[in-house]
Image: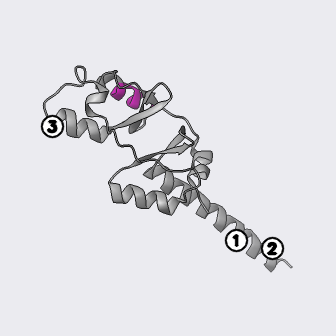
Amino acid sequence: MITAASILEIKGNDVWTISPEDTVYDALRLMARVDIGALLVMKGDQLVGMLSERDYARKVILFGKTSKETLVKEIMTEKVISIHPMQICEECMAIMTKNHIRHLPVVLDGKVLGVISIGDVVKTIMYKQKEKIRDLTQKVLSNENQ
């Protein structure tokens, strides 16, 4: 069973954050530098929002604003949907699909453990399937040699 925690084990649990008072430009520079599509918006240890490339496209570009003059808090998604580390990947995919989102913070007792994306889920499923195929192939080959 693939859980959010096992996805984080494979992909790593780096958490990239930005302050609500930072500019969208600073957020975009950070996302480009670390090659990610979303940042958690944190006030100290508290998760207060999420900012994605989609937020930028829909709330800055389309309204003729500039990223250097717009603060993260003006366009961030405030109602962040998060998941428990033991939620299975099928539940994670269903949550993402239902809510039209691509990133989910993994939270335990109010502490952010990491963030998974739909790409992370798919890569982990493929990785686990390759492991299973390899194990089954070895089992078949060992049975043939007996």
x and y percent of residue 1 in the render?
62, 63
In the picture of the structure, the residue carrying the numbered disc 1 is: 136
For label 3, the crowd category at 10 Å Cα-Cα, with few meaning under 14, some 14 to 19 and many 20 or more, is few
What percent of the width, then of the height, locates residue 27?
36, 27
Cα distance, mark 3 to mark 2?
A: 60 Å
Looking at the image, residue 116 sits to the left or right of residue 66; the answer is: right
Q: Main secondary structure of the magenta part?
A: helix
> As displayed, is residue 42 above or below residue 124?
above
**Along the line of sight, which residue is nearer the eye, 60 or 120?**
60
**Percent coordinates x, y for residue 40 in the rendering:** 42, 34
Tell me which amino acid carries mark 3.
Leu
Residue at (68% x, 65% y) in the render:
134
Contact (CB < 8 A) between labels 2 and 1? Answer: no
Q: Are marks 3 and 1 in contact (CB under 8 Å)?
A: no
Name the outermost residue toward the left: 64
Residue 78 occupies which quadrant of the picture?
top left
Left or right of 39 on screen, residue 124: right
Type of amino acid at the residue the image marks with label 2:
Ser
Residue pointed to by mark 2: 142
CA distance separating discs 2 and 1: 10 Å
The residue type indicated by label 1 comes to: Leu
Secondary structure, mark 1, is: helix
Horizontal and vertical percent position of residue 49: 37, 36
Which secondary structure lies at badge 3?
loop
Q: Which residues are magenta?
A: 27-34
Horizontal side of residue 124 vs 66, given as left or right: right
Q: Is residue 64 above or below residue 84?
A: above
Q: Which residue is mark 3?
A: 62
